[in-house]
Image (cartoon, rainbow, N blue to C red):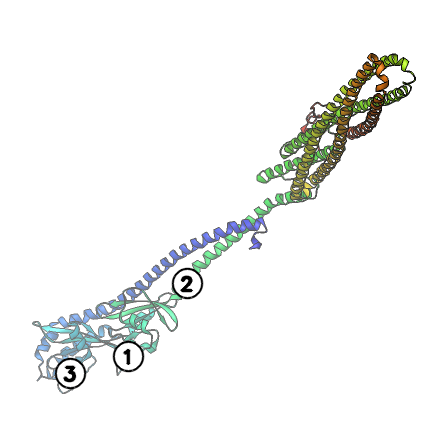
Amino acid sequence: MNLFTKSIARKMIFATVLPLVILFLIMIYVVLGHVKSSIEEQSNQVIETSSISASWQISEYFAKYYSLIESGSKSSIYRDYMDLVTSETNVKDTPEFDKIFNELKELSTLDADNIQAVWWADLDSSQLIMSDGYVADLNGDWEITQRPWYIKMMEKNGLALSDPYIDVSTQKLVVTIAIPVYQNGEMVGAFGLDMLLDQVNAIMSSLKLGETGYFSIVTEENVFVYDPNADFIMKNIDELALGEEVTSFVKNPAGEVEQFDLGGETLCGFASTVADSGWKVISTIPKAEVDASYLKTRSILFGIIGIIMLILCVVIYVSAKKMISPLRKLAAASDKIAEGDLDVEVDIRTNDETAFLAQSFGKTVVRLKGYIAYIEEISELLKQIGQGSFCLNFKQNYDGEFAIIKDALVSTAELVRDTLIQINVAAEQVASGSDQVSSGAQALSQGATEQASSIEELSATMNDISDQIKKTAENATKAKEIAIESSHATSHGQEQMKHMVDAMEDISRTSNEIGKIIKNIDDIAFQTNILALNAAVEAARAGNAGKGFAVVADEVRNLASKSAESAKNTSLLIENALRAIEKGTHIVNGTAKSLENIVQGTEKSTEIIQYIADASNEQAQAIGQVNLGIEQISAVVQTNSATAEEEAAASEELSAQAQLLKELMSKFDLGEGSDGGNTTGSADTASFEDSDFNSDNNAKY
């Protein structure tokens, strides 16, 4: 079957010729069936007509002899003579004998070649006079009632034809025709003749039935009188081993043409009756000869159909070749395109659907070139994104499925760009807060240093207090002023510390927001990676045509991996910053509590100094307590100084991390809106011209 499916020409021949062959076979079957039935009907008519014609000729041949003996049976000469002859009278002794003999002899001379003898027979005396001179008188043993022709005549009750027999003298086949003679309504004798059957055989042998057909004559007793086969003559059908079909056909003809087998050959035959004699003329012809015209007609029909089929196959094959040639050109061009060569030219000069296919093929080539331009531009833009620039500039007018890719690329770039802008803003805020925390910590450290210095001076003064008791009031006043100034400075430091605590809380909240943004970036990177994997799968399905898009998908996947890695690094940095901020918050809270203690101590110092001013007399008794309070203040101040130094160091570290985050963000080109606005690149500003898209497509289709 593959032989008929590998070629369009063979398919067309197969699809066209097979139904026609089936149609022709059906037509031939119907026509030949009709022809066969017509030929059989005509042949049967010929066989039947030939048989009837032969029997009619034999009947006509016998008719003149029937007429002859009928005339003789009605002649008064013979009837009167039969009345004269009695059982006591010998015919030879009668005076009318000579006259009767001469009459008989004269009748026999009417057809001397076929009439062997004409005879007269008397019934009651059983005497016979024949024209050939034979006389059966009273002295003989001849008995009329024993004669076969008499028996047949009596059975027929009229004219009768005896079975043929071989004459002893002539050794020829003879048949007797006899008819009763009546006088006054009573049978008195018989009149008849003995007829040679040579003429009958001559008539039968002259008749033709086709080329090999023949005729036979059988008697009423089914004895063959004539047949081309001499061995059948004078033999009964039962004596011949001709088969049951032939025997049944001869004995009981059906009145129509019948078929039977004889000697291994199928024959067609028809039996017709010879007048009222009971004889039958059988026409026989071989079935092969009857079917010869049908077989010849069938051969001619098959020959004509074969020639028509051959011519039709040649015409279809030539037509198919003309149609296949353009398709082969298109297949060659398609192979070049499959190999990556889009500079193809298909020269097809037809006005049928093949030309439309070539035009569509040309449009497909143009579209493929456009797709390549799409892929190259998308690859360049993805490379640009991979380098950190989100200012996308599309030069092609994307349509079809590539429009979806363009929209996805633009939306992804905008989302990443907006996220990075927000990260940049958050980084700047972290840097600004870090600077403020660092400045406050440095101021706190400086104030703590100054307080330590003041406490040292106060301690020296208190050591000399016993020697300078006189100046206690003055020094107490100065101490009061110093305490007031310290109270103001401490209050200011406490306010700054509150601001720093608020700033640290803002930094913590901002860092949490940055963490959420980094998680969004990581999700975007994961989705981009999934999109790249799907694109790679689709590119693999596209085969060679999707290789370029596979490279683009790989670049997108690399970019997604880099984005995920950057987001991970940024997340680690933010986590470190959060830990530092949390540590700074604990330190600030401790410093705030220390400042509160300083304020309380300063207030107590003010009250004590006031007490000193009011009761300088009691200073000596309280000097021990003052020294103890100063020692406590000195310890607190030392603690505040150490805490301030640690806070300053943490603030510097936070500032350094914020600066590092800002440096990382500086690697991204976010366009003019990188200050926090949600602007996009000029993704859709470039125009697209059909002339650019079709500039390389000059092929004729």
Query: Which of disc 1 and disc 2 is earlier in sequence?
Result: 1
Quarter that holds the C terminus: top right
Q: CA distance from mark 2 to mark 3?
A: 56 Å
From where the camera sits, is residue 670 visible?
no
- The kind of residue on which mark 3 rests is Glu
- The kind of residue on which mark 2 rests is Ala
- Quadrant of res 42: bottom left
Residue on which the image places disc 1: 172
- Between marks 2 and 3 in the image, the one whose residue lies nearer the viewer: 2
- Between marks 1 and 3 in the image, the one whose residue lies nearer the viewer: 3
- The kind of residue on which mark 1 rests is Lys
- Quadrant of res 468: top right
Q: Is disc 3 placed on a helix, strand or loop?
A: loop
Residue 102 is situated, as x and y percent measured from the top left of the image, at 17, 77
Residue on which the image places disc 2: 292
Query: Which of disc 3 and disc 2 is earlier in sequence?
Result: 3
Q: CA distance from mark 2 to mark 1?
A: 39 Å
From where the camera sits, is residue 558 visible?
yes
Quarter that holds the N terminus: bottom right
Q: Nearer the viewer, residue 101 or 59?
A: 59
Depicted 541 relative to depicted 1: above or below: above
Q: Which mark is residue 495?
A: none
- Between marks 2 and 1 in the image, the one whose residue lies nearer the viewer: 2
Q: Which mark is residue 143?
A: 3
Residue 222 is situated, as x and y percent measured from the top left of the image, at 26, 74
Residue 399 is situated, as x and y percent measured from the top left of the image, at 63, 31
